[in-house]
Image (cartoon, rainbow, N blue to C red):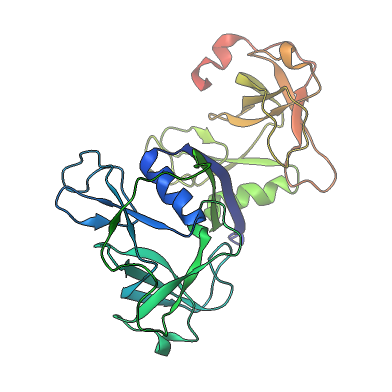
Amino acid sequence: MPDILTAPLVVEFPFTRSLGPVQSAFLTGLRERTVLGVKASDGRVVVPPAEYDPVTAEEIRELVEVGTAGTVTTWAWNPTPRRGQPLATPFAWVLVRLDGADTALLHALDAPGPDAVRTGMRVRIRWAAERTGAITDISCFEPDQGTGGDGHTREPVAHDGQFLDPLTGITAPARLDYTYSPGAAQSRYIQALADRRTLGERCPACRKVYVPPRGACPTCGVATGPQVEVGPRGTVTTFCIVNIKARNLDIDVPYVYAHIALDGADLALHARIGGIPYDQVRMGLRVEPVWTEGSPFPEHYRPSGEPDADYDSYKELI
């Protein structure tokens, strides 16, 4: 029984969106140390402001300024901050109802320990030294050691939402860190690749060979037990031409990514095609793997020099 493999993986991309008048005013206001909310149809002040009424779904635009101090409505202690979180030292996640608001804002509270945090405590905004028009312009909250006032009236004040140089769009990085385990079947497949062999698994019912193996047949729903060595050569069943260069990928564009049906397999895998001009790659092209020293998998596939495969031999694998 092979060791079950695990590996850390990261999915990361920048998310870019335009801002409507409400979100533009809110984020631009943070840059100017001003917190804006919006009045809902029932008179409640929603902070952060929503573009549509949470009850009626009607568009709402009536902006108001609220205070920069407020009351903790609930909290949770975070003993081990993670990458990208507001503070590098242990802190509390808090929901804070700012003075003049009827809903709570989620942010971090800088406190020495969980014993220093309680529901109902008064806190105030600690502004970032450099502000760009983002929620991170609020560096965090901190305990309000004063009388609870913050220089603003406790009642919301009408605001026209107008600022110099307003924001019209934002780019927010999205990142997901997780640990992936391929399971027993794919662990055997990956470990065989280290020996430059490609293993599939056969379904005992329909007799199809799946590469990479999935541990079970997606058609019959039974375990795929018998291991079958396939390839190393195969046939291009279909392909696409990539014209956008990926970050951290040292491959010149354009290049071809293809589905390849390895000899003896009943499922096409995907890989890059090299050793041939991109505009000469075609369906039916016979290819073979190219290994590089120390690589755990083929670096790419290249033409094998054989005649093209007949369409009928791979049409079920397109």
Residue 259 visible in this rendered orientation of the protein: yes
Q: Which residue is nearer to you in this view: 217 or 32? A: 32
Q: In which quarter of the image is residue 232?
A: top right
Image: 141 above or below 278: below
Q: Quadrant of the N terminus?
A: bottom right
Q: Which residue is nearer to you in this view: 138 or 221? A: 138
Residue situated furthest bottom in the rendering: 115
Residue 5 visible in this rendered orientation of the protein: no
Q: Residue at x 61, y 20 (%)?
A: 239
Q: Which residue is drawn at 69% across and 39% down?
A: 247
Image: 66 above or below 309: below
Q: How many marks?
A: 0
Residue 23 placement, left or right of 297: left
Q: Residue 246: x and y, percent? A: 68, 35
Q: Which residue is nearer to you in this view: 130 or 156? A: 156
Residue situated furthest right in the rendering: 293
Q: Which residue is nearer to you in this view: 163 or 274? A: 163
Image: 167 above or below 317: below
Q: Residue 36: x and y, percent? A: 36, 54
Q: Residue 63: x and y, percent? A: 31, 48
Residue 246 placement, left or right of 21: right
Q: Residue 35: x and y, percent? A: 40, 58
Image: 273 above or below 164: above
Q: Residue at x 50, y 42 (%)?
A: 167
Residue 130 placement, left or right of 196: left
